[in-house]
């Protein structure tokens, strides 16, 4: 499967180059006779966690009863909702997807998945009383509160649905699911299936969507099998070599010393890029044969470099890891968290960093099936007890339009989406010190940076966003400008940068 970032590059190639690429790809596929195929596995054994689930599980053990990995989405629904039909829809959906009937428990010190044969999910209904002056605002406050309620991972289901009834034809439907059960693709798939089944039942069509040929548990068994494959072992060894001695703590400009991470909270700051910046990014990607992801990741890397002056900039990022077309209709977290290391030398230009990021992205794409969690364990890297993860800084990129998430709404019903950033906007449990998610729709590019308020003040993050935009503008103006030449700091902060410049952190 070729992800959107790679496909974007391929489509920009001249026709002959594109044909040559696909010839090589076909040859490579033909030669991969030893690769383990994703298939239906026997369930007589205990079901292991996937490596991404292991990472999430590990975090949950460090900070129990948190909502960091709650994934919420809310729909503002204008029109009458047939609650009995919606209940039937959710029962059908849980029959279709095993992962929605899954819990997690320890057996002899090892976590495993346990799938229930059947569950009856409940839809909680909360009526918003008329005495609230702004019923919608009050409902959204409740949506945020319910979205932050933690899950007991040993109790099914690990999702909840709450219908906030403003009046008979006006309601907000909140759906919250734990990240152990889904990724962004899964959430999109789930919303599509709910809407499709609801429409069918509304029209008197009782036909189900059927059961997928494979389930997420099959992927977990498959992942264990590929780790024994010779081609996998070779790629894993390559990644170990690439990351060896590169994983170290970044001297970020913290405002406070680290305290007890079990009490950490986060806030987020959203921003948008201007139309001129968006058009210039589009022009740059065409002229330089790069993707929007590469441009924005490069700027973020340069920003961290300017704050730390460390040569090896370590940033976590996620890659989709759905093995084949069969998995595209399966719910579950088919992702791999990767550690992207960008080497930035003093005196280099924006173009040089962008090219390094391009090479890194393509290289990591080739090795995206290698679970990073297993690499970290094999490298015997000790995690600082006062850190949330193996890395402090994370970057994610969403290049889809929410308008494309669902098919046509059911008759006499209008839908409006609220996503994660609209719902969980303050006092969450952070996963990283800094977590930047950039998103792109048809006509906008924006971002949301979540940060741990225990170590960062709001003003520091506001400055970071300002500096991110300054560096982006400089890149879009002149790719051959040296990244150290762009003035970012004034006054006290300028003294801080000078101190950082004079300190060697590349030990």
Image (cartoon, rainbow, N blue to C red):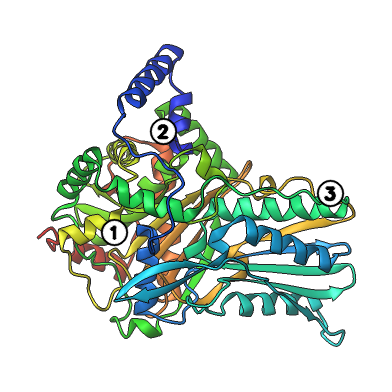
Disc marking residue 373: 1
Name the residue at the bottom extreme: 131
Quick one: SS at disc 1? helix
Q: Identify the residue at image location x=35%, y=65%.
A: 55
Q: Identify the residue at image location x=60%, y=69%.
A: 176
Foreground disc of the pair 2, 3? 3
Residue 101 % position (x, y):
56, 66
Residue 67 % position (x, y):
50, 75
Q: Identify the residue at image location x=74%, y=80%.
A: 138
The answer to whether residue 460 is left or right of residue 233 is right
Considering depth in this image, is 97 or 285 the residue closer to the camera? 97
Residue 177 % position (x, y):
57, 67
Quick one: SS at disc 3? loop
Q: Are marks 1 and 3 in contact (CB under 8 Å)?
A: no
Q: Earlier in the sequence, mark 1 or mark 3?
A: 3
Vertical relation: 426 (above or below) 169 = below
Q: Are marks 2 and 3 in contact (CB under 8 Å)?
A: no
Residue bearing the label numbered 2: 290
Vertical relation: 425 (above or below) 346 = below
Considering depth in this image, is 215 or 152 the residue closer to the camera? 215
The answer to whether residue 483 is left or right of residue 403 is left
In which quadrant is the C terminus drawn? bottom left
- Snapshot quadrant of residue 2: top left
- Snapshot quadrant of residue 90: bottom right
Residue bearing the label numbered 3: 205
Q: Earlier in the sequence, mark 2 or mark 3?
A: 3
Vertical relation: 20 (above or below) 308 = above
Quick one: SS at disc 2? loop
Between the C-alphas of marks 2 and 1, the distance is 29 Å
């Amino acid at each position: 499967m070729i992800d959107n970032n790679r496909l974007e590059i391929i489509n920009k190639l001249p026709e002959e180059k594109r044909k040559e690429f696909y010839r090589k790809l076909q040859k490579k596929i033909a030669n991969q006779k030893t690769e383990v195929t994703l298939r239906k596995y026997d369930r007589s054994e205990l079901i292991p966690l996937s490596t991404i689930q292991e990472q999430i599980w590990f975090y949950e053990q460090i900070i129990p009863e948190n909502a960091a990995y709650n994934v919420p989405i809310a729909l503002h629904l204008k029109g009458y909702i047939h609650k009995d039909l919606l209940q039937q829809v959710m029962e059908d959906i849980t029959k279709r997807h095993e992962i929605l009937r899954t819990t997690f428990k320890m057996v002899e010190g090892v976590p495993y998945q346990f799938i229930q044969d059947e569950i009856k999910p409940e839809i909680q209904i909360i009526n918003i009383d008329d005495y609230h002056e702004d019923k919608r605002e009050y409902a959204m406050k409740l949506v945020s509160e319910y979205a932050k309620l933690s899950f007991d991972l040993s109790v099914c289901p690990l999702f909840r649905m709450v219908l906030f009834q403003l009046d008979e034809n006006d309601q907000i439907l909140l759906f919250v699911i734990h990240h152990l059960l889904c990724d962004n693709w899964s959430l999109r798939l789930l919303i599509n299936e709910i809407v499709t089944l609801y429409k069918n039942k509304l029209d008197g069509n009782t036909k189900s969507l059927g059961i997928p040929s494979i389930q997420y548990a099959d992927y977990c068994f498959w992942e264990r099998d590929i780790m024994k494959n010779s081609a996998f072992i070779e790629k894993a060894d390559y990644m170990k070599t690439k990351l060896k001695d590169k994983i170290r703590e970044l001297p970020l400009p913290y405002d406070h010393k680290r305290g007890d991470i079990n009490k950490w909270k986060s806030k987020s700051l959203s921003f948008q890029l201007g139309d001129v910046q968006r058009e210039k990014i589009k022009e740059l990607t065409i002229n330089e044969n790069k993707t929007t992801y590469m441009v924005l990741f490069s700027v973020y890397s340069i920003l961290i470099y300017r704050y730390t002056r460390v040569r090896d900039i370590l940033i976590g990022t996620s890659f989709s890891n759905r093995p084949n077309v069969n998995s595209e209709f399966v719910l579950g977290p088919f992702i791999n968290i990767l550690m992207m290391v960008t080497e930035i030398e003093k005196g280099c230009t924006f173009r040089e960093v962008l090219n390094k990021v391009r090479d890194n992205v393509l290289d990591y794409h080739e090795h995206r099936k290698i679970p990073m969690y297993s690499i970290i364990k094999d490298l015997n890297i000790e995690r600082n007890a006062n850190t949330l993860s193996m890395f402090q800084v994370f970057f994610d990129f969403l290049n889809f339009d929410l308008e494309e998430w669902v098919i046509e709404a059911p008759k006499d019903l209008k839908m409006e989406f609220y996503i994660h950033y609209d719902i969980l906007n303050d006092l969450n449990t952070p996963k990283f010190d800094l977590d930047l998610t950039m998103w792109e729709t048809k006509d906008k590019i924006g971002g949301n940076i979540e940060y741990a308020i225990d170590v960062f003040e709001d003003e520091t993050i506001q400055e970071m966003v300002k500096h991110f935009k300054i560096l982006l503008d400089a890149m879009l103006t002149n790719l051959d400008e040296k990244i150290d030449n762009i003035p970012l700091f004034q006054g006290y902060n300028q003294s801080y940068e000078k101190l950082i410049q004079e300190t060697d952190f590349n030990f």
